[in-house]
Image (tube, rainbow, N blue to C red):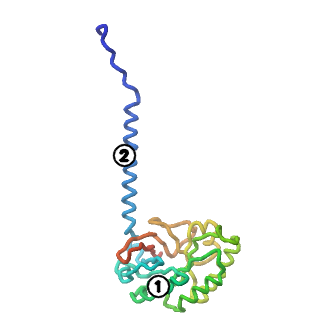
Amino acid sequence: MAQGAKARPKRRAGRAPRRWLLRLAALLVLFGLAFAAWLWWDMRGWRPDPELYPEQGALVPAGPSPMRFETLKAIGATFIYLPLAQGPAAEAPGGFADRFASARKAGLKVGVVLPFDPCLGADAQSGVFAQMVPRDSGLLPPAIALEGLADACDPKVSDAAVESELMTLINQIELHAGKPVILKLAPAFEARHRTASALARDLWLARDRARPDYAGRPWLLWSANSARVTEAGTEPVEWVVVQK
């Protein structure tokens, strides 16, 4: 090599591998975002295979937004459940009473879900149910939604008191309805109270897309899509299937 010639700069070892790692990480992030977007879009209208679950229906949200029950039936619902709203909203146009009548007129089997309030006594809650829900053997078994915990109750309510009031409420609702209740059991409530093993009632569990197993025993109803978008209304419905 001639004297005075400039030496070539040495390449930094590891620079090229780091570039490839950064590119790979960026591609993985983009793939993850694309998959999440696809999953979100797919879940808007997804429901379990009707051949595996031939009996499917919906839990219709409470509220004044119009709901076309004939359309729900046309897209595959054979039954619907209505959450029992309390107060003036229940009797308002488009409220619980109107939806109850419209769903039956559409030829759907109808059931009622009573949201359990752990801060409120059983008598007050069963009184609302008895006032709003007729004694009718043609109705589906009533469901009690067990979701909220007693942590925010004022005055404080012990877990033992919650469980005692729940058992009283179950007995009162079953006496009015003439059939056993279904327990719509959320994971947090089950983790706190172990209701699935304590009470021998049919279970209604929830998990988007994947079969739920948090109760430790078989279920009757599964909320498989918590927010299915349909042509029946502007609000999503909770899509529910029946275990064979």
Image quarter (top left, top right, bottom left or bottom right) of the N terminus: top left
Residue where numbered disc 2 is placed: 27
User: Observer-nearest residue: 115 or 95?
Assistant: 95
User: Observer-nearest residue: 63 or 106?
Assistant: 63
Task: Give the residue displayed 39% in from the left and 62% down from the top.
Answer: 40
What number is the disc on residue 148? none
Task: Give the residue displayed 31% in from the left and 9% down from the top.
Answer: 4
Task: Give the residue displayed 51% in from the left and 84% down from the top.
Answer: 90
Would you identify the image quadrant in which residue 127 lies?
bottom right
- Give how far across and how far down residue 112 sits, in percent: 51, 83
**Mark 1, secondary structure of its residue:** strand
- Give how far across and how far down residue 18 sits, in percent: 40, 35
**Mark 2, secondary structure of its residue:** helix
Residue 242 appears left or right of 198: left
User: Observer-nearest residue: 66 or 14?
Assistant: 66
Would you identify the image quadrant in which residue 160 lies?
bottom right
Decide: is 28 above or below 174.
above
User: Observer-nearest residue: 25 or 242?
Assistant: 25
Between discs 2 and 1, the one toward the N terminus: 2
Task: Give the residue displayed 56% in from the left and 72% down from the top.
Answer: 185
How far apart marks 2 and 1 lie (CA) works out to: 49 Å
Three-letter residue code for mark 1: Val
Residue where numbered disc 1 is placed: 110
Decide: is 105 above or below 38.
below
For mark 2, does the 10 Å Cα neighbourhood hold few (<14), some (14 to 19), or many (20 or more) residues? few
For mark 1, does the 10 Å Cα neighbourhood hold few (<14), some (14 to 19), or many (20 or more) residues? many
Three-letter residue code for mark 2: Leu
